Image (cartoon, helix red, strand yellow):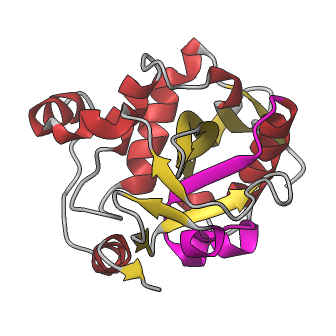
Amino acid sequence: MNNLTIRLETEKDYRAVEELTREAFWNVYKPGADEHYFVHTMRSHPDFIPELAFVLELDGASPAEPAHIIGNIMYTKAWLEDEFGKRKEILSFGPLCVAPEYQRQKLGKVLIEHSFEAARKMGYDVNIIFGNPGNYVSRGFVSCKKKNVSFVAPGNFPTALLVCELVPNALDGRRWMYIPSTAADCCEDTTAVEAFDATFPPKEKKWMPSQEEFYIYSHSSVVR
């Protein structure tokens, strides 16, 4: 697709990005979704990195048809703490969205690679996410166990915790503890999530097999 543009998100894009996020995640990980509320609140969180909030815009088919956003990626700060209590600031992306009708065309890869290059220029060398390994191992992510990165407790290596070194050998084998941003904590307020979702057109909440897959990944760990 040659008629694509990647650019930074602007305030005028906010609602379109929230609508895109809702469509991309609806019924994927749970009946309904809360990622669009996360996006809405993330922008005012101190850990949000606006310099890495990119949208993927598709040009209109004609002068009468405006360009529209079909993908986006957003980042927050996160941290690694070594066994001596020394902290290292790193990155975590999410949500990463591509409109359902444009998925499986490697557009997520385009957004990841573009944002990784921008992150390197900002001095970041590690990115850690929670995600389905099948979606990300081809993008350079590996099991957190391979990089000695635990979560919650030493020796706990969640299956869904994935590590990507933006700079080779950025992690030197020390034992690390992952400390995520609190930006996503907003989604625990289910009343606020529902109130925000009510500002969008109604959609049916239902069970999908992807929800069970996500449950398995998010509730399992790689052991020593």
Picture quarter containing residue 204?
A: bottom left
Residue at image x 56%, y 14%? 12
Residue at image x 53%, y 45%? 81
Q: Which residues are magenta?
A: 122-147
Where is residue 172 shown, x and y percent of the image? 75, 59
- Which quarter shows the N terminus? bottom right
Image-based side of 116 in relation to 121, left or right: left
Front residue of this view, candidates 223 and 83: 83
Q: Is residue 61 visible?
A: no
Magenta run includes residue 125: yes
Where is residue 23 shown, x and y percent of the image? 41, 50
Residue at image x 68%, y 31%? 52
Magenta run includes residue 208: no
Q: Is residue 37 visible?
A: yes
Residue most extreme to the left = 191
Picture quarter containing residue 63?
A: top right
Image-based side of 51 in relation to 27, left or right: right
Relative vertical location of residue 190 with respect to residue 32 in this rendering, above or below:
above
Where is residue 217 shown, x and y percent of the image? 38, 76
Where is residue 190 shown, x and y percent of the image? 13, 39
Residue most extreme to the bottom = 224
